[in-house]
Amino acid sequence: MIGIRRLRWLGTCRRHAACLVTWLVAGLTVLTMAGCGDDDETKAVIPLGPPSLSVVFPSDGACVMFHDDEVPAVRVRIEAQNWLLRPIGYCGETYSQCGHAVFFVDGNEMIRSASLVTDVPFEKLSSPTGKHHLRVELRNDDDVVVLDRMKEPLEAEVSIEAVEAGQACP
């Protein structure tokens, strides 16, 4: 008789354990699905306030060495506040403070970018090494230069001296 009671209890316990495991697996599956998203998915935060722009690297007056590549280039890091930095054609009518950066060296347009870090090529210049003036502008999807709070073109500028890879700065 004790053996039968144990078997009944064991059967009930197994059913409860199976139900509990089923519910746990179902719950974890739902939580996992709710927490997943596409890696390419980005949520744009609508900027508030007037946009601002600065060149973080290189600093004004810095001596920079070209990357050891076929094309002489300087890595530039910018900071854009209250601005969605996105590729041309992304912003449309939806985002008013959205667009790309345009990089100039000595007044010559070098590259357009939607990245905070950009390798700016110097190959178009007649003399890539030496002293140069680097300017960055923010532009909207219509390729119009954005204005700051003073209604001036939103741009950041630094003067640099560029040297070949492996050379020392003067």
Image (spheres, grey):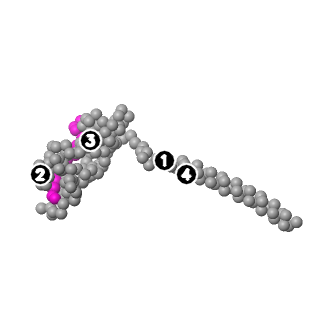
> Up-down: is 63 above or below 157?
below
Q: Please name the residue shown 81% across and 65% down the image.
A: 6
The residue indicated by pointer 3 is 138
Whether 147 is drawn above or below 75: the answer is above
Of residues 104 and 165, the one nearer the viewer is 165
From the image, tell me which residue sits under label 4: 32
The residue closer to the viewer here, 127 or 135, is 127
Q: Which residue is mark 1?
A: 37
Of circles 1 and 3, which is in front?
A: 1
**Which three-letter amino acid code belongs to the residue tagged 4?**
Thr
Q: Which residue is mark 2?
A: 127
Q: Which mark is residue 46?
A: none
Taking the spot 21% from the left edge, 55% from the top edge, the residue there is 70
Mark 4 or 3, which is nearer the eye?
A: 4
Predominant secondary structure, magenta span: strand
Q: Amino acid at mark 1?
A: Gly
In the picture, which quadrant includes the N terminus? bottom right
Percent position of residue 96, x then y: 34, 35
Q: On the picture, is 170 further left or further right than 56?
A: left
Q: CA distance from mark 1 to mark 4?
A: 10 Å
Please indicate whether residue 61 sits to the left or right of residue 28 in the image: left
- Within 10 Å of disc 3 (Cα), the crowding (few <14, some 14-19, many 20+) is many
Mark 4 packing: few (<14 Cα in 10 Å), some, or many (20+)? few
Between disc 1 and disc 4, whose residue precedes?
4
Q: CA distance from mark 4 to mark 3?
A: 40 Å
Residue span colored magenta: 151-164
Work out how far the residue at label 1 is from the one at label 3, CA to CA, in angstroms: 30 Å
Label located before the other in sequence (1 or 3):
1
Distance from disc 2 to disc 4, alpha carbons, whole Å, reads 56 Å
Q: Amino acid at mark 3?
A: Leu
Residue lying farthest to the bottom in this orientation: 2
Residue 83 visible in the shown view: no
